[in-house]
Image (tube, grey):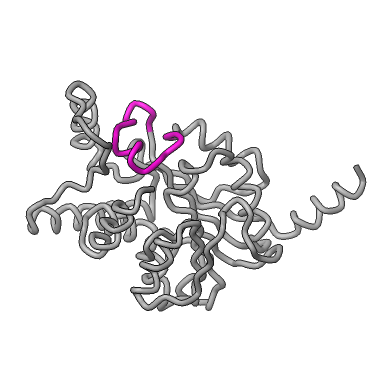
Amino acid sequence: MRAEEYERMYHQENTYWWFQGRKEIVLELLGHHTPLSSERLSVLDVGCGTGLLLEALRPFAQPVGVDFSPLATNYCRQRGLQRLVCARVEALPFAHERFDLILALDLFEHIDDDAGLLRELWRVCRPGGNLMITVPAYRFLWSDHDEALHHRRRYTRDSLLRLIRATDFEIVRFSSAITMMFPPIAAFRLTQKLFKPRGAPKTHLIPLPRLVNRFLIEMLKLEARWLRHFNLPFGVSLVALLRKPVGREAVNVEREKGE
């Protein structure tokens, strides 16, 4: 991702509807399906960007953030965050079974070997621990937004499920998300393909009137509450909450010894 995109992200994360809405969805699901609010968990945010979720998790944990970009970790430090590592996410500098909860939010689409990344997250997740993944959905929504963010792909429900099922992670929740904003976003991106703008691709962080932005955040807060109880059929994103079974790591080690 280009330097100017990190800067835009840092300056808009605390107010812009997309970042705030995704944060509400993530925290609602974690609060409902994990012991985040009742236990002091060891948490890792992989591909932490400029630190919005790391900051949001501080009341519940002492989260560790990893990003390959020094720009990203520098912006995290401007938030007062200290537990940061600059490293490639495909080769994390942590011991086996180190974390109770791992976040990989809008990360997999940046990585060439997404299956290898998932295996690495399995390695550092404790048995009984959780992994939350969000990815952009639908290949037909590919646009200069994806190009500006250096995405390798967008996912379908089937392609993400195949990726997950190639591991021993159990699926706790699997749903579409950012559903209420799907029609206008799809219309905008499909129209843009007909009238592709000139120049370098840019992310679609379109400035909105304050009241409109606030309304969209409240819509996504409502969607987050819906997701506590049922899955959504379509959306701009896919979200998966996974659990590593207790004892499965030992089984896999024994299997490798016998081969």
Relative image position of residue 16 (x, y in whole percent):
21, 57
Which residue is drawn at the image coordinates 63% and 54% (left, top)? 91
Q: Is residue 128 above or below residue 187?
A: below
Residue 150 shown in magenta: yes
Residue 96 shown in magenta: no
Of residues 105 and 168, the one drawn nearer to the viewer in this rendering = 105
Quarter the C terminus occupies: top right
Which residue is drawn at the image coordinates 29% and 39% (left, top)? 145
Relative image position of residue 48 (x, y in whole percent):
44, 60
Task: Provide the residue span drawn in magenta.
Answer: 138-154
Q: Is residue 161 left or right of residue 141?
A: right
Relative image position of residue 25 (x, y in whole percent):
35, 56
Which residue is drawn at the image coordinates 27% and 43% (left, top)? 203
Q: Is residue 141 above or below residue 70?
A: above
Q: Is residue 140 above or below residue 232?
A: above
Tag count: 0
Of residues 207 and 249, the one drawn nearer to the viewer in this rendering = 207
Of residues 29 and 45, the one drawn nearer to the viewer in this rendering = 45
